[in-house]
Amino acid sequence: MTELVAEKSPLVVVLAYDGLCTFEFGVAVEIFGLPRPEFGANWYRFAVAAVDEGELRATGGIRVVSDGGAELLEQANTIVVPGWRGVQTPVPEPLSDALRSAHQRGCRLMSICSGVFVLAATGLLDGRQATTHWRYTDELARRFPAIKVVEDVLYVGDDHLLTSAGSAAGIDLCLDVVRQDFGLERANDVARRLVIQPHRDGSQTQHVARPVARSRESQRLGQLFDWLHQHLDQPHTLDSLAQRVGMSPRTLLRRFQESTGITPARWLLNERLKRAQQALSHSRLSIDHIAQQTGFGSANALRHHFRQQTGMSPLAWRKKFTEPAV
C-alpha cells in the first residue's frame, strides 16, 4: 500500500467509460468521493476520469458526463477501475499506457470485479496474484496465463496492484484501502455510515452458503461482531461465544462460517492482526502492550502470528508503515 504524503490529501480517480458498471462505480464514489466533513481536511480528494469522449452510457439506462479526462490519471495517487464493459472487450492502448505510467511513478491501481481485465491488459499483473468474480476466474486464467489467479477470495493485493471479486467485494477492498491509509477507526467510521459490518478479510470465500441470514440470527451475529470488536483483548472460546448469542456451539460455528466464510477463531485472529497493525502504525506502545491490548496475550504470540501472516516482524511493520509526524 502507498504511504500518504502528510502535506497533501491523496487524490483518488475512478474511471468512467461507455458501458459503465453502475454499481461498481457507485462503490468507488461512496467510499472515496462522498464528502465527509466529520473528517475535516484529512480525507481523499476525488475525481472521475472519462475513458471515452462525450456522454457515456451506464448500466440501468443512466447517462454520465464527466468533468475530467485521462489527464487526471497523471495526478492520481490511487486509480480505481470499476468493472469493465465486457471481459472480451479490448482495452484502449492509450488507457493501458496511462495506467502503466501511473504505476511506474508509484500510483496505486485497484480494480473491482471485471475491472481486473483492464489491469491484466497492461501486463502489470503478470507474475502477480489477482482475483475477480468467480464467474470470470477461468476466463482470466485462460487469457492471461502469466497471472497467478487466486480463486474464491474477496480481494488480493500485490505491489500497489489490488484486485477484488464481485461487486460487493469491492466495498471490502475499498474499506481495506481506507484502513491502510487512515487507520482502523476511520475505516470503521466509514463502514458504520454505510451500515455494514467491517469484518470481511480479503482471504474470505466468495461462496457463502447463506448470503442472507435468518432475521433473528442476523441480528444476534451482528451484535456479536460489534461486541467482539470492542473486546478483542479478552480470551474467547466457541463455547463462550455460543453462550453469548444463545446458540449451541455447533450452530454458531455453522452460522458464523455461512456469514463470513471463516471460523470464529480465524476471524478473531484476522481482527487482532488488523488492530495490532493499527497500533504499530499509529502509536509508540511497546510490543508487549500491543499484544495484551489485542488479545494475543504475549509478545511472542504476536510476533509468531504477525510474521506468519505478513512475512515481517511487528517492528519491521512499524518501521515501514508508521505515518510521518505532521
Image (tube, rainbow, N blue to C red):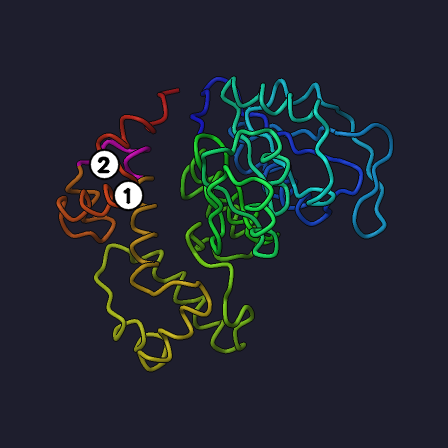
The crowd level at tag 2 (other Cα within 10 Å; few <14, some 14-19, many 20+) is many
Task: Give the x, y percent position of residue 204.
Answer: 43, 56
Identify which residue, 52 or 40, lies in the foreground. 52
Identify which residue, 52 or 170, lies in the foreground. 52
- Say which residue appears at 29% left-offset and 45% top-offset: 309
Marks 2/1: CA–CA distance: 8 Å
Q: Amino acid at mark 2?
A: Pro
The tag on residue 276 is: 1
Residue 212 placement: quadrant: bottom right
Dots 2 and 1: beta carbons under 8 Å?
yes
Task: Give the x, y percent position of residue 322.
Answer: 32, 28
Q: Left of 156 or right of it: where is 83?
A: right
The residues colored magenta run: 279-286
Q: Amino acid at mark 1?
A: Ala
The crowd level at tag 1 (other Cα within 10 Å; few <14, some 14-19, many 20+) is many
Magenta-drawn stretch contains 268:
no
Residue 261, compared with residue 45, is above or below; it is: below
- Say which residue appears at 84% left-offset and 46% top-offset: 62
Disc nearer the start of the sequence (2/1) = 1
- Please give the residue where the numbered disc 2 appears in the rendered image: 314
Please tell me whether mark 2 sits on a helix, a strand or a loop. Answer: helix
Magenta-drawn stretch contains 283:
yes
